[in-house]
Image (cartoon, grey):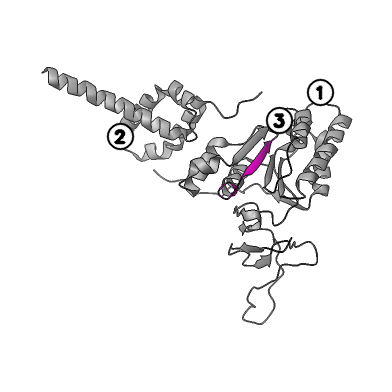
Amino acid sequence: MGFQRLEVTHPWVEQSVQFGQTETDECRLPDRRLPSPTGNPPPPRKTPHRGVYFLTAWGYPACMETLPIPRTAGLIVATSTHGLREQAAQLASELVLHGPVTVLDGGNCFPFYRFARLVRAGTDESAAATGRLFVRRAFTCYQMLALLESTPSLPQPYLVLDLLSTFEDEQVPAWEASRLTDACLAQAKRLCLHAPVILLLASPRHSERAHLLERICLQADQTFALEEPVPTLLQPSLF
Amino acid sequence: MGRTVQSITQTFLEEEQAFARFRRALRRSDQLVLDDLFASARQHLAAAAYASHALPFEVFLLSMLLEEHKEVMRLRQLLEKK
């Protein structure tokens, strides 16, 4: 597969790279920032993944303010401490504007109304766009594995929401949850051969099962941690 | 099995809450009118739930319009009788 152009249009990043490059290997993103007036080179970028990315692979452009968009087929994991509903809605609404998207919802948390609003804001043909969204849900960890196993590997993005939600069931032994996690990871690896698979994971509710999240993060090609927004102090108005 | 989406009453309350700042900025008389509009939309929550529309606020707006038109028709009939 040849390289396809990936345009990064966010002013924070201002880069242009080839599709297929990652910043973790030898293909470093070119630093095209202007030198300072003193002639000193600019300081190294601390957060290279931040920004809004437009992915042109398979014709699925996407943009998002909080999460970068996958640049290539691979397993991308994003963890958050404050819920993933808004991120899921934003990501799915951008992706469906340009092609089919499959959402595998493990936590029954996909915000449909928010998604519909975002799609409506993005296009006039909201009915056609929402028709390109395929949502499948699982309510137990066994169903989650069956869901992943029965998902065909197609060249379209997969969005897996709150994969580990059902794995924290107390009635599922730890060894069983661990085995099922490995099986789910194997299925995710199968899907990510041809398309980006994005795992949006919430922080574990029980510390006993926190190792499952670490195991998934170790297997990921890219990992992002979404930080909780810091509340800003506002002067209360008089009226 | 869990719900696919939240209930229509929860959605209605969320939409109503989203306009709380707008309501606060209105005059008291207009606030009462706005409350009346939302009350008229609330009368058709069952129909809105059955509609399963992707954008429920559009159904709420139509419900408000429906009640307004009913009022117009009632007043028109009164005028015709007189």
Q: Amino acid at mark 3?
A: Ala
Residue A171: which disc? 1
Mark 1 and mark 2 in contact? Answer it, CB < 8 Å.
Answer: no
Q: Is residue A99 magenta?
A: yes
Q: Are marks 1 and 2 on the same chain?
A: no
Above or below — where is A137 with respect to A222?
above
Residue A49 drawn at (x, y percent): 69, 58
* Badge nearest the viewer, 3 or 1: 3
Gap between marks 1 and 2, in whole Å?
55 Å
Residues A216 and A2: in front is A2
Which residue is at 28% across, 32% downward?
B29
Instruction: Name the side, left or right, on which A89 lies relative to A221.
Output: left
Q: Which residue is mark 3?
A: A138
Residues A116 and B40: in front is A116
Q: Which residues are magenta?
A: A95-105
Q: Are marks 3 and 2 on the same chain?
A: no
Gap between marks 3 and 1, in whole Å?
16 Å
* Badge nearest the viewer, 1 or 2: 1
Residues A86 and A118: in front is A118
Q: Amino acid at mark 1?
A: Gln
Above or below — where is B6 with respect to A73?
above
Mark 3 and mark 2 in contact? Answer it, CB < 8 Å.
Answer: no
